[in-house]
Amino acid sequence: MTTPTQPIRRTEPPLATRLRITLLRTSRRLRNESAGTLPEGHLSVLSALFTHGALSPGELAEREHVRPPSMTRTLQHLEGEGYLERATHPTDGRQVVISLSPAGEEYIRETRRRRDQWLQRRLASLTRDQRAILAQAESILREVID
Amino acid sequence: MTTPTQPIRRTEPPLATRLRITLLRTSRRLRNESAGTLPEGHLSVLSALFTHGALSPGELAEREHVRPPSMTRTLQHLEGEGYLERATHPTDGRQVVISLSPAGEEYIRETRRRRDQWLQRRLASLTRDQRAILAQAESILREVID
DNA sequence: TATTGTTATACTCTATAACTATA
DNA sequence: TATAGTTATAGAGTATAACAATA
């Protein structure tokens, strides 16, 4: 039993809708590419340390939008895997200073390398003009989402 | 103690790297927009039912890349919240047919509406030419990631 | 007394293994 | 005997509450 009064959709969805679908689909695929089996939240901690240098557990918890006890456990795991180094703050004995170990730095570099490669393989078939459009679109998007 | 031999980076990163950063950042923001507090995996189930119509638990498990017992629990929760309807297969008594309730359909519609609105607000300040570039970029990206 | 971080404990989501019902 | 789904149980990850150490 069909519904003959319902017309087949011919109009293109709005730009925001098209972007939502394609951006979320692309990011899902990108996130699958990784240097190992660390969950996304743990990877995100390594990434923050890679980008911003040494941070305290409290700063990491706030930045990653998790509670301090959750960050404690995440850091314990990452330290056990050898991805982190831990030091005491030079002047404030309460604080702990977390930084990436060489292995942690390599993990994040390798993950980014793999994600870039995944994308690059898909961009390889494009023309110069198509790449230019993607480059311009990236700049536009980066501007408006900040 | 600085490293004076290390030059400040002046060159633009490659296109794939720029896209990776901006697409992942945008998708993270988009995923924050939702009609409620359902976790991403549950939302994804509603979305699959919205797009593909009625599906069995087994089909949903495969499509969502989770194991059948996990899907059973997800469906139990979503059914308890009133987002699903459950029926027995007309010819195969073993199978269960899952479909969206009106509330489930509204949940997914509202989530998509909010995400589109979030994006739309950010696209509002763009020129016609900038929108055209985003539209072309979306088509290009959609082609290459499929 | 306030702040930083950890430990204790519970809840959620997912997994593997074992079980029930139907084909 | 094989298939679809559920129940039993365990393992991650995150949360709140209580605690220890330092400012």
Image (cartoon, coloured by chain):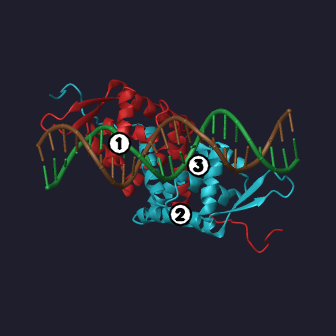
Chain colours: A red, B cyan, C green, D brown
Q: Quadrant of residue A88?
A: top left
Is B57 on the left or on the right of B30, as rendered?
right
Is B138 on the left or on the right of B89, as rendered?
left
Image point (43%, 55%), residue name: B29
Q: Chain of mark 3?
A: B
Picture coordinates of residue B74, whole percent (x, y): 61, 52
- Disc 1 is placed on an element classified as helix
Image point (26%, 39%), residue name: A55
- Disc 3 target residue: B142
- Disc 1 target residue: A71
Instruction: Kindly report the distance in space between the C-alpha atoms of the residues bearing marks 3 and 2.
Output: 22 Å
Is there one chain holding both mark 1 and mark 2? no
Front of the two marks 1 and 2: 1
Kind of residue sitting beneath label 3: Arg
How many residues crowd mark 2 within 10 Å: few (<14), some (14–19), many (20+)?
Answer: some
Proximity of marks 3 and 2: CB atoms separated by less than 8 Å = no
- Disc 2 is placed on an element classified as helix
